[in-house]
Amino acid sequence: MNRTPQPAVRCRGDGGGIAVFVAICTVVLLAIAGLVLDGGGKLRATERADALALEAARAGGQALDPADAVTGAAIRVDPAAAQAAASEYLRQAGVHGTVTVSPDHSELTVIVDTSYATRFLSIIGIGSMDVAGHGTATLLHGVDQPE
């Protein structure tokens, strides 16, 4: 009795399977690192925008209306001079923003609009993120306290 030898059955192993797993994990870890780093960068840009808005509001708050201040009638800002001073501060800082004075001329609000240029998220098409900062200066006189 002659038997024909059967070819040996070879099991396909895991050859190359680990490479795919490592490639997928690497892409996911890079994406997470990108989100963390660009998210932190946006937070820093927001803090800077807030600081610039506050400083611009303070600069504008120094532009008092001399007619009321000298007589002691009231402490108010000169709206045109306050807006000009705050806008000049923003211009020197290299950012754009809006400056508004309250109707009673005792409060100055600055909103800064800028953007953060991403480093990692630009790979997926997000080149920048909008950032806004907000600052308000309220004029106080003597021992007055804000209500």
Image (cartoon, rainbow, N blue to C red):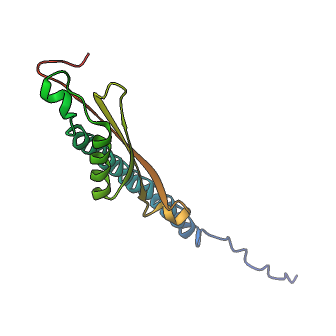
- Residue under the point 41% across and 51% down: 39
Left or right position of 3 against 146: right
Quadrant containing the C terminus in the rendered view = top left
- Residue under the point 22% across and 28% down: 139
Quadrant containing the N terminus in the rendered view = bottom right
Nearer-the-camera pick, 146 or 123: 146
Left or right position of 122 against 57: right
**Residue 83 coordinates in the image, percent (x, y):** 32, 43
- Residue under the point 27% across and 36% down: 78
Q: Residue furthest right?
A: 1
Nearer-the-camera pick, 109 or 116: 109
Can residue 52 be spotted in the picture? Answer: no
**Residue 58 coordinates in the image, percent (x, y):** 22, 40
**Residue 49 coordinates in the image, percent (x, y):** 33, 48
Q: Residue furthest top?
A: 147
Quadrant in the picture for residue 99: top left
Number of marks: 0
- Residue under the point 33% across and 24% down: 104
Nearer-the-camera pick, 91 or 104: 104
Can residue 14 be spotted in the picture? Answer: yes
